[in-house]
Amino acid sequence: MRSAALGGARSIALPIFLLVIASVLVANLVLFGITFHGPPPRAPRGIASIAEALKSGRPSGLRGPPLQLSIAARPPRPQPGQHPAPFAAARLAAELRVQAGDVVAFAGDRPLGPEDAFLGDFTFGWHTGGHWRIASRPPPPFFTHWHVMVLLAMLAAIVALSLPAWLIARAISRPLRRLAIAADQAGTGARLPPLPGGSREVRDLARAVTTMHARLASHAEGRTAMLAGIAHDLGTPLSRIAFRIEALPEEARARAAADIEEMRAMIRETLAFTRDDMVTGPATRLDLGSLLATLVADMADAGAPVALQPGPRVVVRGDAGALRRLFANLLDNAVRYGERATVGWEAVDGSAVTRIEDAGSGVDPAQAEQLFQPFVRGEPSRNRSTGGTGLGLAIVRSIATRHGGAVTLEKGEVGARARVVLPLAG
């Protein structure tokens, strides 16, 4: 049943397992090729092969590090770093079947291999026919042709495995990245974007994300319904209170009526904030400059001190009503706390960056991020005429996040600056 639901998707473990097997296989093939090519320059040289070279005078047929053969009238002398090796001289004399006095042996400081082999440099001499036959091996260089071949073979193996490893890693990470983007873009009440397919584990994760999103949406709907019910229930006693205050003196009646209207406004704004977090309108292509110009013109006609600094034509994709409310809240804040507002925009690295600046006292950088939390206000007064309800910036961030963007507060050239980043429409 589960396999049918997954559409026969394979496990992510299979490509990883195949890559590991391929890596081990290639590494062993490289090792075999290096071994088959020949022993390393520091491989041991046996006494028997040295004796054979002295007898025949031909070192070319011997496998292993090279020997140097020569003939001299005098016995060889030890090279720098070499010392007499009586055991090797005895073994060489036995192999040549000559007297011990007809053989000399000197070895370097490198440790011996087996008892009849030398790992480092050496010089052997055999007195025969009135002259000395000499077989020697100088200390090998630190970096030889054999080392070059080994490094090239290893590099070839790495290159051969890099491409399939990269492709497999991309195949594994691509659906996970798409899933993360889809989950991040999904609002609480918005429909979840199409989730990617892929391996069995990715599909299991996508199904879990879908289930979690449905649970969160159900929880948010319940919260909204609860708030709507509370707001409805509060309406009746507020109406009764409004009726009863008619008997108060005019001055007290006006203050009480203002308090009641403030309570109603707070309830409306709280419900609006909750619904905005739940409901997303249709996304369309929007000319950001036209949207901002229309908003600034409307606010200027109403007497608000706002100004527009035109920028290039940029097109974004989103809900026109929600974006208009985002920028309206920021402009209202700039006018309320900073006396006036100036808005401008530009295109930067595939994003539309809008800046709204005021002429106020600025914003405390340590407090800037905290101001985006619901019911947090920068103005400590509880007066709605100066402090509001503390939901304006929370609504701004919620809308920006739903559109794949971000909003920040920072210190501007004069006062505070709000910076909104939205992705350009593809």
Image (cartoon, rainbow, N blue to C red):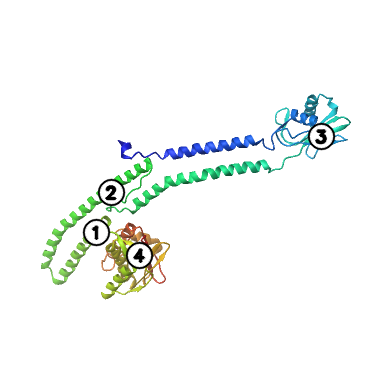
Q: Look at the picture and state if 243 lies above or below 217.
A: below
**For the N terminus, which image quadrant?**
top left
The kind of secondary structure element at disc 3 is strand
Q: CA distance from mark 3 to mark 2?
A: 89 Å
- How many residues crowd around disc 1 within 10 Å: few (fewer than 14), some, or many (20 or more)? many
Question: In this rendering, does residue 319 appear at all?
Answer: yes
Mark 4 highlights which residue?
Answer: 315
Please tell me which of labels 4 and 2 falls first in the chain: 2
Nearest to the eye among marks 4 and 1: give it.
4
> Tags 3 and 2 in contact by the CB under 8 Å rule?
no
Q: Look at the picture and state if 390 lies above or below 38.
A: below
Mark 2 highlights which residue?
Answer: 216
Mark 1 highlights which residue?
Answer: 270
Q: CA distance from mark 3 to mark 4?
A: 87 Å
Q: CA distance from mark 1 to mark 3?
A: 101 Å
Mark 3 highlights which residue?
Answer: 134
Amino acid, disc 1: Thr
- How many residues crowd around disc 4 within 10 Å: few (fewer than 14), some, or many (20 or more)? many
Q: CA distance from mark 4 to mark 2?
A: 32 Å
Please tell me which of labels 4 and 1 falls first in the chain: 1
Q: Quadrant of residue 15?
A: top left
Question: In this rendering, does residue 362 appear at all?
Answer: no
Give 239 or 13, whichever is nearer the viewer: 13
